[in-house]
Amino acid sequence: MCGIIGYIGSGNACNIVVSGLHRLEYRGYDSAGLALCAPENNKILSLKAEGKIAALEEEIARNLPDSLSDSYSLGIGHTRWATHGAPNLTNAHPHLSNDGQFAIVHNGIIENYSALKNKLTRKGYTFESETDSEVIVHLIAECYEDDLRRAVAAAIEQLDGTFGIAVVSSKHPDTIIAARKGSPICVGVCDNGTIIASDVSAIVNHTNKVIFLDDGDILTASATNIDITNFKSIPVTRELTHIDWDVGEIEKGGYEHFMLKEMFEQPHALANVTRGRLLIDDGNTKLSGMQMDPYEMSRIASMVLAACGTSMYAGMVGKYYFEDLASLPSDIQQAAEFRYRNPIIQRDTCMIAISQSGETADTLAAVREAQQKGATVMGICNVVGSTIAREVGRGVYLHAGPEIGVASTKAFTCQVTVLAMMAILFGRARRLSLQAGRELVGELSRLPELAEAVLAQSDNILKIAEKYAQMENFFYIGRGYMFPAAMEGALKLKEISYIHAEGYHAAELKHGPIALLEENVPIVACVPEFSGKIKTIGNMQECRARKSPVIAIATEGDKEIDEVCDDIIRIPKCNELFAPIPVVIAEQLFAYHIAKLRGCSIDQPRNLAKSVTVE
Ligand code: F6R
C-alpha cells in the first residue's frame, strides 16, 4: 500500500528519497513521485511518474542534472496504491498547492474530502487530481500564516478519516512536518540528517533507532532535531525503539526473489521464534511478552483470534491448538467483519490479534473493538513497534526478520509456531499434562529441521509444477489441521500466479464445487499421516473419479498414497499438530515455481499491497 519517505540533512535528498522509495516498493504501488526543496531556491521541484520507480528515475534524469541534484537537502517521496482516482500521473503524489509553495504526500483515506473540496473550490482553489489527498495541501495553504506546523495542525483538524502525511514548503526549506492518524509514520535521526518513513524498512539502512509516532502526533523535523507535539500543540515524548534488522535482511542476498529468500529463511526463522521459549523439561513454553501468570491464564474462558488473509489461516490453526491443547472454546474471526457484527466478548475472553505487519487496518479495528468491550487483548506481530504491537502492549513477536515479498511465507510458519507455544502455555495452566507438554515442546524444537527437509524438495516440486503450470483452476483440500493448510495453499497460488485456486474442506467439495471437476482442474490434497487421512483419501478418490489430477502432499514413506494420486510432494514425518508447517512450506514452493514458470511478478503481484492499511 502507499509508502512515504522524507529526508532532510547534508546528504543528497534526491538520491536518499529515491533509494527509500525502492525500499518501499515491496508494499505494492502503481505510481511514484517526489518533491525537493533547496535552501537557496524558493521553488519546490516535483517529479512524478506512472508505474514503476524506474520511470520516476528516468523523469529525474531528464529534469534534474547531476550537477544540481546535490543542492537539494530536503525531499519527500511517495509510492501510491490507487484508492481514489485511477493510477495515473495526475493522481500520483506529491500534490502541490496552487502557488507551488507547499507539497504533501499522504497515506490513508480522507472521508470528508468531497465536502472539503467543495468548500475550497468555492474559495477559488483549483484541483488537478481526483484524489482525496489533494484537499490536504490546499487546506494547509489556506491555514498558513507564517508557521508551517501550525498550518498543518489547523488543516488536519478539519480532516475525517485516516492519514499519515509528510509536508514541505519552499518557505521553510529546513523543515519537514509529518502527522499521523491511523496510518504509520516513524522517524530516525542519523549522522547526516533526519529521515521519516511510513515503514521502518526505509529507515533501517540509515539507523536502527526509530521513533514511532502515535495517532494524534505532529512531528517537526530538521536536519539535526525532532520535536513531537499532539494535535493541540502540546509537546509529547515518544520512546526510541531499537530495530534489530540488519540491512542484509532487507536485500535479496543472491536470491532471485524476496519470496524465495524468505521461504529459505524459514529454518532460521523457526529457530529464532522458538529460541529461549521452549522449556523441554517443564513440558512448557516461556512467553514473557504475554505478561500473564498461570492463575490469569486459568481464568480465561474463551479465545478469539482475529486476523486477515494468511494470518487468518494461521489463526485457524491456532483455534484448533487452543481447543486441543488448552481445552478453551476458541473462534477465528475475520477481522474485517468483527467490528461490524455485534461480537459477544466477555470479561474473561482473550483476543489474540495476528498480524505480520502489525498495521492491517481491519485487524487494528478488531483490536480496538475488543478492548472497548473489555477483553484481554494480545498481539502476535512480526514488526517491532508496529501499531497493533503498541496498542495491545502485550503478546509475542515473531522475530522472523523483515518479510518483504508480498506473499507471506515465513510469517505464517512462525505465527503457527507462536500459537502452538501459546496454546501449550495456556494448556499447562489448565489440563495439559507434563508428559504431553514435553512431547509437544520436543516436537516444536524439530521445526527448523522439518522446514529444511521440505525446502530440500524444491527441485522435485519444480518438476511437478512444470506439469501443472498452464492450468487455470485448482482446488486445495484438507481436513482438520489440514483444512487451514489447504486454504493457505490456495491463497498462495492465486496471489502470485493469478491462477484461480480455492481452498476447501475435503468433505465440503461434494456439496457443490465437485460440479467443476474435470481433467483440467487439478486437486492439491493435504494428506500427511494424520487422523483425517483415510477420509481425505476417500475424497481424493472422488476427485479422481471425475478425472481431476490429484497432487498429494504426503508423509515420506507412506505407500498408501501412491495409489490414489498422480503426483506426490513428500514431507517428513511429524506430529500431526505441526504438519501445517511443512505442508504449507511445500505449497509455498509449488506456488512459487508455478508463478515463475508463468512469468509473474512474484514479489509484487498485481493489485496487491504488503500491508493493507485501509478498510
Ligand atoms: C498473503 C498475505 C496477506 C496478509 C494479510 C494480513 O500472502 O500476505 O493475506 O496475510 O494482508 O496482513 P498482516 O499479517 O500484515 O496483518
Image: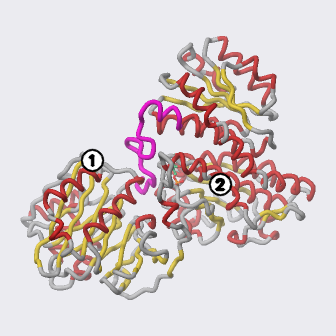
| Residue 221 falls left or right of residue 61 | right
User: Residue 443: image x %, image y %?
Assistant: 81, 51
Instruction: Please tell me which residue lies in front, 126 or 602.
Output: 602
Q: Main secondary structure of the magenta part?
A: loop
| Other-residue count near label 2 (Cα within 10 Å), few / some / many at <14 / 14–19 / ≥20 | many
Name the element at disc 1. Answer: loop
Residue occupying the point 42% across, 53% down? 26
Residue extending farthest left: 124
Residue 324 visible in the picture: yes
Residue 299, magenta (yes or no): no
User: Residue 335: image x %, image y %?
Assistant: 54, 52
Residue occupying the point 55% across, 30% down? 502
Q: Amino acid at mark 2?
A: Cys
In the figure, 237 relative to 564: above or below?
Answer: below
| Other-residue count near label 1 (Cα within 10 Å), few / some / many at <14 / 14–19 / ≥20 | some
The image quarter in which residue 127 lies: bottom left
Instruction: Please tell me which residue lies in front, 68 or 530.
Output: 68
| Residue 486 falls left or right of residue 156 | right
The yes-or-no answer for disc 2 within 8 Å of ligand 1 is no
